[in-house]
Image: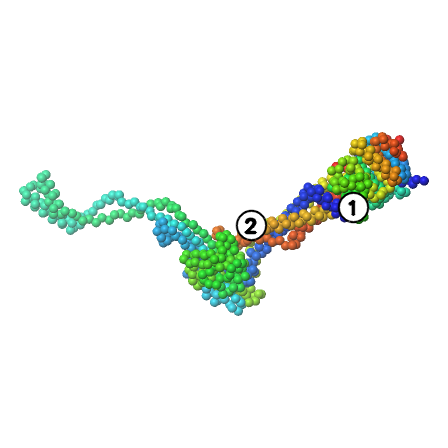
Amino acid sequence: MFYLKYLQAELVRRWGNTLAIVSGLAIASTIIIVIISISQALSKTQEKVLNPLQNIGTDAMVTRSIDQGNNDNIDVTTIDEMRSENRITTDFSKLGNPGDKFNRDVFLPGTQLTFETNTTDKIDKNIVADYATGLLMTVTHQEGTIPDLSVDVKTGGESLEVNQQLDDSQRSGFRDSMEKAQQEVKDKGLDPRSEEGRLALDKAIKKYNPSFNFNITTPERTLRQQVCSFSTDVNSETLTVAGVDINKTDFGLITKKDIVDGKYLENDDQALISKSYADKKSKKIGDKIKFNDQELTIIGIVVPQLYSETADIYTTLSKMQTLSDKKDRINIVLAKAKNAGAVDEVSKSLEGIMSGAKVINSKDTAKEVTGSLASATNLTNRFIGLVSAIVVGAAFVIVSLLSIISLNKRTREIGTLKAIGWTNTKITRQIFLEKLVLGIVGALVGVVLAVGSIALLNRAGISLTASVSDSSNGFAQMFRRFGQNNQSSTANQIPFQATYSLSVIGIGALVAIIGSIIAGGLAAQKSLKLKPQEALRNLE
Amino acid sequence: MKKTLIELKNASKYFKQGNRIIKAVDNVSLKVDQGEFVVIVGASGSGKSTLMQLMGGLDTASSGEVTVEGKNIQKMKEIELAKLRQNTFGFIFQNFNLIPTLTAQENVEAPVIDKDGSKKAYEMLVKVGLADRADHLPNLLSGGEQQRVAIARALINNPDIIFADEPTGNLDSKTGEEIIAILKDLNKKEGKTVVMITHDLDAKKIADKLISIKDGKIS
């Protein structure tokens, strides 16, 4: 068919023009698809963060935090935890001698204080169908050499002035020796007052009373010497570890469904690690993890669904209690209501099981969520319309200009077509076909580029942070606690994964195709209106 | 009795340039009969091209009547004019006006509607002696070759009238002679009516009717 030959000839032989237009359309299409996909992904992620409990089929979560004021009925352990304020005190003297290498793991509950396991006995089984417990703590690993803390303190070299009264017995003793000495001198026939006599008296006194005893108490003194700061060769690393109740495998901090590789915990010597921890530390199944003197073997990798309570490492609850020296204690209870409509009732009931109980339920909507996740979501939501419009507008202008330029060059050609008998309809159809093909090719290239870009973006492994600013909410407390750890803790890091849906791709493709046709159409109008001779007169 | 194919009655064409009005064709009346070889001569800017454009329906007259095969083409809609240009007229231009992205054969095929276009186009090229150049793009053809392709294109729908606007203008004299010879053949042997504009004084010799134009008027 002639029109096909002409179509091919035009697009192939004027390849520069073709390339330019296709590129413009492809870029516009790509940008639109990528922006919409990112925005959708951010919205979805934000939804997940705002309603973490929804992901795991739990209706309420109970944790403990103590504000000033409700300090009745708190046990000693909890009071200690409150006092320690999440600080690690390192008493080097207890760890060994200076120069020794040391290695220890310190477990802290942070703001999520522990409570006795048997607190769950108080849960009202009439309205709570089931519950799961857990113990989630931060662990700081310290490793290094004990520094030498000895200090040389110089003392002595002080002079003491002593003034002491003789007592009675000393005085009598002195008098006795004086008499004896005087007698001795008289016996020798010397005069005690003479020079010779005095010397002899001194000698004789010495003989009869050679010494005196005095008690001297030195004055009290406090010696102060500045200790210059010693260098410490200590490395610290913090991560989050959680103990889970392995009797409950279908709901809890992690479930069997969350396992992406390996298998679920079977006994106390095993551990599961989160995928982000595995990736960050290049750990795999079979590797061992050590805490103080205890060793765990990794048997599986999980992707936890409960964003607000994610840990790097999971082990059994009993093992966790042993490792952290918190026997019979937990700090999280997840509860499932018997009746979906009674969630509020369940929340209220759970608040009463201990002092300082903080309950959040799946109905709680977000307080202010801040952090890069929220910022990014808000930004894209606000600007998605604007940016898309700008991009489409720009692409449209570019493609229009290119079309106008190329069609101007073809004005004479169009005049010739008219002279050989082509109707406006036929010419329009030909140009429409060209623009359609350009649009389709542009759309295809755009879609491929978009899919590729999104894949690259996902592989970059970007994580977004989310934290809650409302401090009276237990939810916020949890987030803030994890916010303090910025090492390998993954609690409030939400991985960003964009997906592309067919409808979004369709939108991007349509933009390219329709843009091409409209832009081309507008440009063609001008040329089509000319009479053949006017067109042929064109000197281009 | 020869049939009058084209008739102009007091036809004029004006162009506005700023405040001035330029009369390219000023009140011209003439006839072109079937089988005639009409030559229009005139100096540059005398209006001869415009005159031919009026006759061939490539432009509309500002006033007066232009009749083709008895029909007033001034009143025709664009779609009818297109049909006229396709089937009744064949155009040849000074600068060839071939479509640069199409091969010689494809160029010749362009005016054709039916499916045999390709075949017909090739036959036309054979007729003008360019069968071996069928697959060449215009930029690979010499001026004379390009003009022959244009002639083949003009002939493909077997039109009654061939309009040639300075067909030898961009060619050397020898090639020009060849082209004139082709047109002469078409006229004498196939009975095609030819309307040719030219500077070439030799063309006067072969003309059946010579029209001189000066300042838009027939002199």
Label placed on residue B118: 1
**Front-lying residue, A147 or A278:** A278
Displayed quadrant of residue B27: top right
**Front-lying residue, A138 or A436:** A436
In the depicted structure, whether residue A490 falls above or below residue A132: above
Give me the residue at 59% from left, 55% from top: A44
Give the residue type that dot 1 points to.
Ser
**Tag 1 and tag 2, C-beta contact below 8 Å:** no
Lateral position of residue A199 relative to residue A484, left or right: left
Q: Is residue A161 visible?
A: yes
Label placed on residue A143: none
In the picture as drawn, the residue positioned furthest to the bottom comes out as A126
Lateral position of residue A345 relative to residue B204, left or right: left
Question: Mark 1 falls within which chain?
Answer: B
The x, y position of residue B72, in whole percent, is: 88, 42
The x, y position of residue A152, in whole percent, is: 32, 46
Q: Which residue is labeled 2 in the image?
A: A460
In the picture as drawn, the residue positioned furthest to the right comes out as B1
Give the residue type that dot 2 points to.
Ala
